[in-house]
Amino acid sequence: MNRPRPKAKRSRALGIALTPKCVKYFERRPFPPGQHGRRRRSESDYSRRLLEKQRLREQYNIREAQMKRAFAEAVRRDGKTGDNLVSLLERRLDAFVLRAGFARTIYQSRQQVVHRHFLVNGRRVDKPSYRLKPGDVVQVAPGSRDKTPFQLAAAGAWAGSGPLPGYLEAKLPELKARLIAEPPRAQVPVVCDEQLVVEFYSR
């Protein structure tokens, strides 16, 4: 999903670095953008819930309509709605590509999926919103393996941001990964208080 607003400004507005490149900008100016960004502003309950919802949505780079659909499905599932919501979003193909170390950012992973660089269980998939099931195998298509981003991925260039989550296994030299189980919230590396997101949509 393309957004005209610079990612560094969005990072400062949300209070989180959306890309590795944004980290240095965020650390240098860790306050919202604009001439009133340094002022301490009292937050209402609504604004706190809205902020958490926006944080979660931006980290997965999805539209509001997609977020609402995921929340509606999370409500229908057994268990905690917030945990269900994060698990559903984490099983998106573009999110999986990022976690497995095939891409540096969620924006790059989305572009790679749309450009038909990935196979799921041997079939080419070009929908970032494609939802994986435990046991699904994702691999880079043979014709794409020689491209520079995937050569870097095979060398582990994008895997240094943190440990691999326990719900997937990846063989980077082979450019192949598998979803082992549904992602538990405790292992999903997103910055968000999902309970506030639930309260936002339940109001």
Image (tube, rainbow, N blue to C red):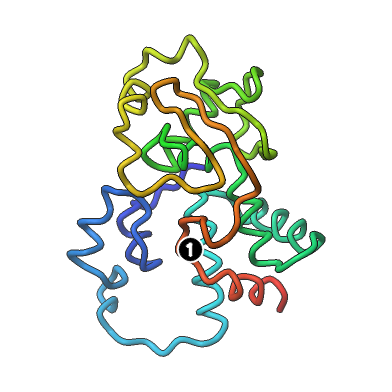
The residue closer to the viewer here, 122 or 23, is 122
In terms of image quadrants, where is residue 38?
bottom left
Q: Picture coordinates of residue 87 (x, y %)?
A: 63, 54
Q: Picture coordinates of residue 156 (x, y %)?
A: 32, 32
For image coordinates 66% across by 18% down, the residue present is 123
Left or right placement of residue 15 versus residue 43 in this view: left
The residue singled out by tag 1 in the image is: 55
Three-letter code, disc 1: Arg
Q: Is residue 128 above or below residue 190?
A: above
Q: Residue furthest bottom?
A: 42
In terms of image quadrants, where is residue 126?
top right
Q: Picture coordinates of residue 69 (x, y %)?
A: 72, 54
For image coordinates 76% across by 60% down, the residue present is 72
Q: Picture coordinates of residue 184 (x, y %)?
A: 60, 57
For image coordinates 51% across by 64% down, the residue present is 54
Q: Is residue 80 above or below residue 174?
A: below
Q: Residues within 10 Å of mark 1 (few under 14, many from 20)?
A: many
Q: Is residue 165 above or below residue 178?
A: below
For image coordinates 49% across by 71% down, the residue present is 51
Kindly state the secondary structure of the residue where label 1 is placed: helix
Q: Is residue 180 above or below residue 37?
A: above
Identify the image quadrant of the C terminus.
Answer: bottom right
The residue closer to the viewer here, 39 or 144, is 144
The residue closer to the viewer here, 108 or 80, is 80
Q: Residue furthest top?
A: 143
Number of numbered discs visible in the structure rendering: 1
